[in-house]
Image: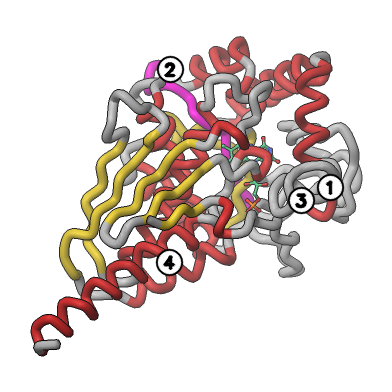
Amino acid sequence: MSTEASIRADDTRAEARALSTAATTAGHAPSIHNTQPWRWRLTSNELNLYLDHSRGAEVTDPHSRLAILSCGAALHHALVSLTADGWHTILARMPDPAHPDHLARLRLDHRIPVSLEARRHRQTIRLRHTDRRPTAGTTTDADELNAIVAVVKSAGAGLHILRPDQVLELASAADQAQRAENADITWQTEVNYWTGGTRPLGSGIPDAAIPDQDAQTTVPGRDFGHHGDLPISTAHENAATFAILYGPEDGEVDWLRAGEALSAAWLTATELGLSVLPLSATIEVAVTRERIRHLLAGLGHPHLVLRITTGDPAGTAAPHTPRLPADQVIERF
Ligand SMILES: Cc1cc2nc3c(=O)[nH]c(=O)nc-3n(C[C@H](O)[C@H](O)[C@H](O)COP(=O)(O)O)c2cc1C
């Protein structure tokens, strides 16, 4: 083989490796009920992201808004990985209008210098996790919140930090949403499936990540229908910040972008030592989604509520949830 041909072969192998690492790294993304509703198709020079309806939460999320948002987080994780490997990529969102489940196509464009920050960002993907424990710690620093708002904006979405009076309205809406869901037997069955023993291995929320008692909070967290094994403090959570992740419109591509922004915000928060908890019940129920939209006062459409807290002072991390084996979410061609 000529030197030129051998260099080309090395380049091709490096590209395939970077794409494969990106798809694997994306598997660590957060998702509604840890359903991991994504499927990657990997060729030697392209990565394609599809919504996988077979792992959807049909009752909680009939229009797939939260599933697509979860896929957006996975897409952002993949982009972070490719940047950490020194690639500038060409991203097409919803590249094929005839196939709306084809959410994104990623192609490698050209090499870029690798920064330490990009490498650190990829490492943060493995550290990020959902922590449902209430913390009675200190309020979040305004500069740190501004840093999160800025990354959300650069990801094409917005983050509205709620004032104390708006938090009370959020609490009331969250309570209304949870009561509506609890009254629906099909909803209860679905939550039991994703938090119980029969879900596919490597998905769903284990008891180890569910609080062992009701938390003392103003805004109620998700009622999973049972207590788990996660020890939590009995102190009242009074220092949390609540925010609404929003976008200009309310369609599939906006949900995808919101997921990218969620990932960007969460990775930045993790690096700042902050904890993020998505709260989606008010978004799942149409009437409470409308109440949350009013809180935005014309800024846009709500996609997710976030609780942001200072990290646990004891430094005892809540456990990580499992993930599906890579061969169940990545198809190689
Ligand atoms: C769109 C979306 C909505 C979510 N909604 C909630 C929620 O309402 N309550 C909750 O406790 N966790 C919620 N989560 C967190 C997921 O349950 C969590 O990401 C998943 O179990 C994987 O765990 P990990 O984030 O620790 O990796 C949500 C996550 C996403 C991406």
Q: Single out the mark in the foreground, 4 or 3.
A: 4
Q: Single out the mark in the foreground, 2 or 3.
A: 3
Q: What residue is rendered at 41% in x and 61% in y? A: 22
In the rendered view, tell whether residue 164 sits above or below residue 5.
Answer: above
Q: What residue is rendered at 58% in x and 48% in y? A: 30
Residue 319: quadrant of the picture: bottom right
Residue 159: quadrant of the picture: top left
- Asked whether residue 168 appears in the rendered view, the answer is no
N-terminal of the two: label 2 or label 1? Answer: 1
* Residue picked out by circle 2: 297
N-terminal of the two: label 1 or label 4? Answer: 4
Q: CA distance from mark 4 to mark 2?
A: 41 Å
Instruction: In the rendered structure, find residue 133 and report the number of the disc placed on it.
Output: 3
Q: Single out the mark in the foreground, 1 or 4.
A: 4
Q: Secondary structure at mark 1?
A: loop
N-terminal of the two: label 3 or label 1? Answer: 3
Q: CA distance from mark 2 to mark 3?
A: 30 Å
Q: Mark 4 touching mark 2, by CB under 8 A?
A: no
Quarter placement of the N terminus: bottom left
Q: Secondary structure at mark 2?
A: loop
Instruction: In the rendered structure, find residue 192 and report the number of the disc placed on it.
Output: none
- Give amino acid for label 2: Ala
Q: Position of residue 291 (x, y in %)?
A: 57, 14
- Give amino acid for label 3: Arg
Counting labels gives: 4
* Residue picked out by circle 4: 21
Q: Mark 3 touching mark 1, by CB under 8 A?
A: yes
Q: CA distance from mark 4 to mark 3?
A: 32 Å
Q: Are there few (<14), some (14-19), or many (20+) residues within 10 Å of tag 4? A: some
